[in-house]
Amino acid sequence: MFKYLLGKNEDIPAGSAAVFFGFSSIIWFVIGTGLGSFNAAKLAFPDFVSGNIYFAFGHMRQVHVMAVIFGWISMAFAMAMMYITPALGNTKLWSEKLGLWNCMFWNVGLALGLTVLWSGVSSGREYSDFPWPIDLYLAVFVFIPLATNVWMTILNRKTQGIYTTNWFFAAATFMVIIVFLVGNSPEFFHLTGLTEAYLTWWFAHNVLGLWITPVAAAIAYYTIPKVTGNPLYSHRIGHLHFWSVVVFYSTPAAHHLMSAPLPEWLKSFASVEGVLILVPAIAFVSNIMLTMRGKWYMFVENIEVRFTITGCLMAIPLNMQGGFQQTRAINWYIHGTGWIVAHAHLALLGFSTFLEAAAVYLSLQTLLKRKLYSLKLANLHFWMLLIGFTTYWISMTIAGLIQGAGKIYEVPYIDVVIAEHPYMIARWIGGTLVFVGNVLWLYNMWMTARVGTVVPQGRMPHELAYER
Amino acid sequence: MAGFREYKIGARIFGSALGGSMCITLLFPSINIAAVSSTDIALEKAFSAGHETGFNLDDPFLQGKNKPLEVSLKADPKTGQPLAQAVKVYVYKAGTSFPAGIIHPRILGEGIEQVSVQQGHITEANKDAGAVFAIEKSIYQGKPVSFVDNLTATKGWTPADVMRVAKDADISHTGAGKTMFVREGCWWCHTLLPEQTQDWQVFGAPPMLGDFNGESPTAFGSDRKAPDLLHVGSRNSSKEWMMMHFFNPRLVQPHSIMPRFDYMWGEKDAAGQKIDYAKWKAEYTEYTEGKRVTPPEVPSYASDSEIRSLVDFMLSLK
């Protein structure tokens, strides 16, 4: 990588930036889920590595969250953009060199940000925990160069129209910059009080709604048609998805603070808009499912399709929860409980991660022109992720319902803690399965790059048979 | 750029959709929120916590620097004569940043702003010289109103004067304690937001709209794995209980899953003796194995330790 950073753009092989982003994302996934497993162990066994400031739960919890969001998920997005955007425009990435520098600055900045977070240097604002210099760094050296590369590649495309995936990429890279700069404005300009509390959740909501959800969906819009060979079922439904994300997903930020003293009209408005998120959600899921027509055998036989469709299927419970749990009728019961933690993991580890994992599998094989090293390991990875996640989700949902009951029936809090204990152990086991699965994945992708069977020119990796 | 023309309409619709969304979710609420006046709770929180509790350039490592002290003043700092009633004052030593309400008095809200400026002389407060503030009552347009009194301007009480008559037991490191609360991530499990459901019977009254003016960060917390703390000082005001609970929560609550915060005691205890953590842990292990009848004594914390400020903050959450 380093020899290309100072080289000429023309000398850098196409796809280099995507490959580096792909491997970076897997490494951050291993780190992020490892931290998650470690944190979960602390909740199950409170004296596990306790009494040390550097391994205190309160110092490490946010490092897990930021590592998976800005390391794993966002870097997998960057990989997908560097690979898919030029592929759909029948052109090259606008600048491989910018992409490589972007990747380097991203890894350095994230490592720095997580280190300061770990040491306790935090803005004290959930999801925007990074101190403002790190926020500024991420905007300037991470998201703006990424967006520039994506937009310039789209402008320099050799096709006439712009495919659905690229609408989402172009819009989401723009929106994440706005969200980053506006959402962190309390830190930049020292805005205080309810403004600070509300903007914290405005950021948290929109970084999920205008960055993670649409980009993950955009990736599925590419993966499924590409691998199955079916055209996208409907571009009109794609339009509906796109515009309803912009209109409905950008407005319900206040539904994260339903029990806080915000203006009541704002909470009611946010709640209604929150239900309307079902519009893009249903549009997306039905579009992908209908694209699968006649190719459902690939759900069983093809690893990329299996990951993507599993992720899309998980979008159904995700959005049913998301649409209704934020209404006043349900929110009063489950707000602030493990139910929400389960829901957040359904979004990021269930829905989103499965779509990105498929994209990383597909892109790295295609760009390296190497067939996946081992199908067995890939299958194991899939099942460890799915079983690990499901264990996590079920145990946390039950724990959340216990907490909710404890909350409204005014059970002494310690009895809730005692009742939750078995589910805390189950959550730790589930999280550890995910972590171990990712270690296997990293090994599998590394071996693919080293010794995977060479894919002949003009063929896609999934057209070749596995050797292991 | 030629290829972009056909998407001009799309780009315009996109701009107006996102812009409209930001108007509704940012501009309109900000008008409502800006019109909210501080409650007494907001004034007390803002003046005890100071300018900023999250990362800031005056306290980049969140050590509790650049924070005011909350003093329960029992004697007149000028004459040394005992006061009829203790007065709670907020001491901003020279160089300590003032809270947002002093820098931008508009944040205090209608009425409070006018009285604080005219009667409380808050605009005369000088960061380089330091200042002493108190929350007092007055009348604004015929209605009772709380206001901020800059005692350095109105009574001539300087921070040095106040600190001269204040005993250590009268001083609460509330602001630095909130820094500890943020740095140690207490808010990842303990909320500061009783909900508007049955919550208020156990954890106390939910906060109101004006309870947050000037506070940053508000640190509501979202994932409640432990009791709400907004009114913890009213439920339990025992320093000794807090001390044991922070050192090892299992001493007072065997089923607690809270981490130990014994490292916040630092090197030395209240008597200046070095704390032997290894010995304590060995004895505690013996206790858990049934080889000892009682657990080892928790060391008393030094008055300048980090745990002191955290306990002070806990007890301030009334």
Image (tube, helix red, strand yellow):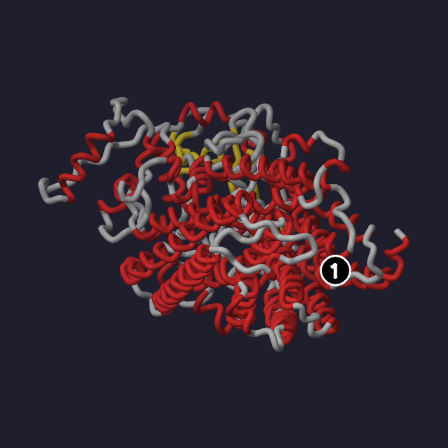
Residue at 86% x, 56% y is B4
Residue A135 % position (x, y): 62, 41
Q: Position of residue B220 (x, y in %)?
A: 49, 52
Residue beneath the point at 51% across and 39% down: A114
In the image: residue B6, left or right of residue A322: right
Q: Hey, which quadrant is residue B308 in on the image?
A: top left
Estimate the x, y position of residue A452 in percent, counting from the top left. Answer: 54, 48
Is residue A183 positioned above or below B152 on the image?
A: below
* Residue B219 appears in the rendering: yes
Seen from the viewer's position, the closer of residues A8 and B152 is: A8
Q: Is residue A171 left or right of residue B132?
A: right
Circle 1 sits in a helix, a strand or a loop, which is it?
A: helix
Looking at the image, how many numbered discs can be counted on the residues? 1
| Side (left or right) of A238 relative to A38 | right
At a point 65% along the width and 39% down the height, the residue shown is: A136
Q: Is residue A257 shown to the viewer in this render?
A: no
Q: Dot 1, how many residues are within 10 Å of its Cα: few (below 14), some (14-19), or many (20+)?
A: some
Q: Quadrant of residue B143?
A: bottom right
Q: Is residue B227 above or below residue B113?
A: below
When the figure is inspected, residue A244 is found, relative to residue B70, above or below; the finding is: below
Q: Position of residue A400 (x, y in %)?
A: 39, 64
Q: Chain of mark 1?
A: A
Between residue A7 and residue B258, name the one nearer to us.
A7
Residue A396, image quadrant? bottom left
Q: Amino acid at mark 1?
A: Trp
Along the viewing direction, whichever of A279 and A132 lies nearer the viewer? A279
Please name the residue that numbered disc 1 is placed on.
Answer: A167
* Residue in view at x 81 percent, y 53 percent: A157
Front residue of A223 and A30: A223
